[in-house]
Amino acid sequence: MSYLILVRHGQSVWNLENKFTGWVDVDLNENGKAQAKKAGELIKEKQIHIDLYYTSFQLRAKNTLKIIQEELKDFKSVKSAWQLNERHYGSLTGLNKDEMRQKLGEEKIHQFRRSWDLRPDPLDKNSSYHPLNINIYKDIPLNKIPDTESLRDTYERVIKFFNEEFKNKIENKNILISAHGNSIRALCKYLFNLDDNEISKLEIPTGNPLLIQFDKNGKIFSCKYLDAERAKDLLVY
């Protein structure tokens, strides 16, 4: 048996302000730090030895993992991968979701947030929110930096990385990934074989570890959120 633990970062400053965040590098708020601490406590209770740690390039995911490791008292090196970043929300980046619902309508915003292959308009390359103008992305090849993304685009980069990085590890290593709502949603679509309609319904709560157990053949044996009070419907298991 082996384990994969997926953790969406704790609540961020822009989560609280209800903004489209995407690739903007905002940090956790105090509630998010508390959620990360609780996530570490819940993982510690399971007494699972983590072999490998992964996170995105983004501060909110990195700091969530840092807090979890402090709780586990396990300070192994962490691999950061931009492929695990949140979905890029294009021209919606930095805008308030409720204000945009009033402007564009509930249905349109829901489509932008949850549809499989609809992209918002591209973000202006001169925007301070564009990844080209954010220092942590300076070493990413220019042709890999998006102006906007659909969930399909996010899925393709996340799953390509997952298959390249984990193909020979998932059967015998315990892995923890600290990432984002849409990058984890992409992983769940792949792992649970969800269709394009099912994936639009999948909610990923902040700071709640999703524990996936694999059998000796690399097939999913069980799956559950560790914080039952804040669990969301997985549509499977």
Image (spheres, rainbow, N blue to C red):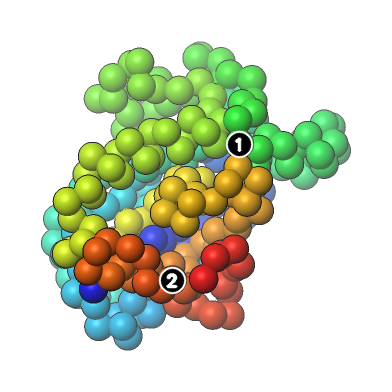
Q: Position of residue 52 (x, y in %)?
A: 19, 59
Q: Residues within 10 Å of mark 2 (few under 14, many from 20)?
A: some
Estimate how packed mark 1 is, as few (under 14), some (14 to 19) or many (20 or more) residues with alpha carbons within 10 Å. many
Give the structural element (helix, strand or loop) at label 2: strand
* Res 236 → quadrant: bottom right
> Which of 54/31 is in front?
54
Q: Secondary structure at mark 1?
A: loop
Q: Relative to residue 140, is residue 196 drawn left or right?
A: right
Kind of residue sitting beneath label 1: Trp
Residue at the spot 48% in from the left edge and 51% down from the top edge: 193
Q: Residue 214: percent from the left, percent from the top?
A: 30, 68
Residue 94 showing in the rendered view: no
Say which of 135 and 207 sits in front. Answer: 207
Q: Quadrant of the N terminus?
A: bottom left
Q: Earlier in the sequence, mark 2 or mark 1?
A: 1
Residue 13, given in percent of the width and then of the height, sits at 54, 52
**Vertical arrangement, residue 199 with respect to residue 74, above or below:** above
**119 is higher (above) or lower (below) than 17:** above
Closest to the observer: 197 or 181?
A: 197
Tell me what residue is drawn at x 33 percent, y 36 percent. 160
State left or right for residue 162 relative to residue 98: left
User: Distance between the Cα atoms at labels 2 and 1?
Assistant: 24 Å
* Quarter of image, res 115: top right
**Residue 151 visible, this orientation:** yes
Q: Which mark is residue 205?
A: none
Q: Which residue is mark 2?
A: 223
Identify residue type, mark 2. Cys
Query: Residue 116 bears which disc, if any?
Result: 1
Which residue sits at x=47%, y=61%?
Answer: 10
